[in-house]
Image (spheres, rainbow, N blue to C red):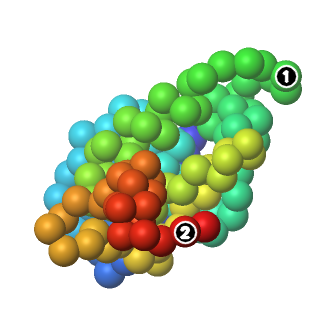
Amino acid sequence: MAINMAETLLRDTKLFCTETEAKLNGKAIEITPMERRLLVFFMERPNETLSRETLLQNVWDYVPGSVTRTVDSHVKKLRRHLGGFGDCIVTVRGVGYRLEPGRKKPRLPRGGVRPCKKDALKSEAEAGVSF
């Protein structure tokens, strides 16, 4: 199955992908042919929630009802390759994934570390905040 060429902006950075190459802001990113197929499929359907089943059927040609973690592992690798833009591929819990090209970069609080929920609850309890 041949893939098309796709081009989109992730935030304000150009992402370009074909059957043979992928570039982020003009710089080549080394991804496998299957990761390129997955990326193009996402890019052709921005902001559309795609079920794992849909991705398996259209990217991998799997038959309906197949149980596999292939999609999850490829999305994880693709996010890693996209670096700071990997968070533009959003997990839709219990359904699948969605590419949100305009997704805002998450902001970290001052100091650069987001406290875990348990620590936040502990600090509130120490401060006398009741629920």
- Residue under label 1, please give it: 65
Q: Element type at marker 1?
A: loop
> Residue 6 vs residue 66: left or right?
left
- State left or right for residue 30 relative to residue 89: left
Most extreme residue toward the bottom is: 12
Q: Residues within 10 Å of mark 2 (few under 14, many from 20)?
A: few
Instruction: Tell me which amino acid carries mark 2.
Output: Ser
Q: Position of residue 108 (x, y in %)?
A: 28, 69
Residue at 74 percent across and 18 percent down: it is: 67
Q: Quadrant of the N terminus?
A: top right
Q: Are discs 2 and 1 less than 8 Å apart at CB?
A: no
Query: Foreground: 32 or 122?
Result: 122
Q: Is residue 73 above or below residue 39?
A: above
The total number of labels drawn is 2
Cα separation, mark 2 vs mark 1, equals 48 Å
The answer to whether residue 58 is seen in the rendering is no
Say which residue appears at 23% left-offset and 68% top-offset: 25
Q: Position of residue 77 (x, y in %)?
A: 38, 36
Q: Quadrant of residue 19?
A: top left
How many residues crowd mark 1 within 10 Å: few (<14), some (14–19), many (20+)? few
Q: Residue at x 48, y 49 (%)?
A: 39
Query: Residue 16 shows which numbered tag?
Result: none
Say what secondary structure mark 2 lies in. Answer: loop
Figure quadrant of residue 111: bottom left
Residue at 48%, 40% in the rendered image: 75
Q: Which quadrant of the rendered structure holds the C terminus?
A: bottom right
- Viewer-proximal residue, 125 or 37? 125
Task: Give percent across and percent down for residue 130.
Answer: 55, 68
Q: Is residue 35 above or below residue 14?
A: above
Type of residue at label 1?
Gly
- Name the disc covering residue 130, or none: 2
Percent x, y of residue 74: 47, 33
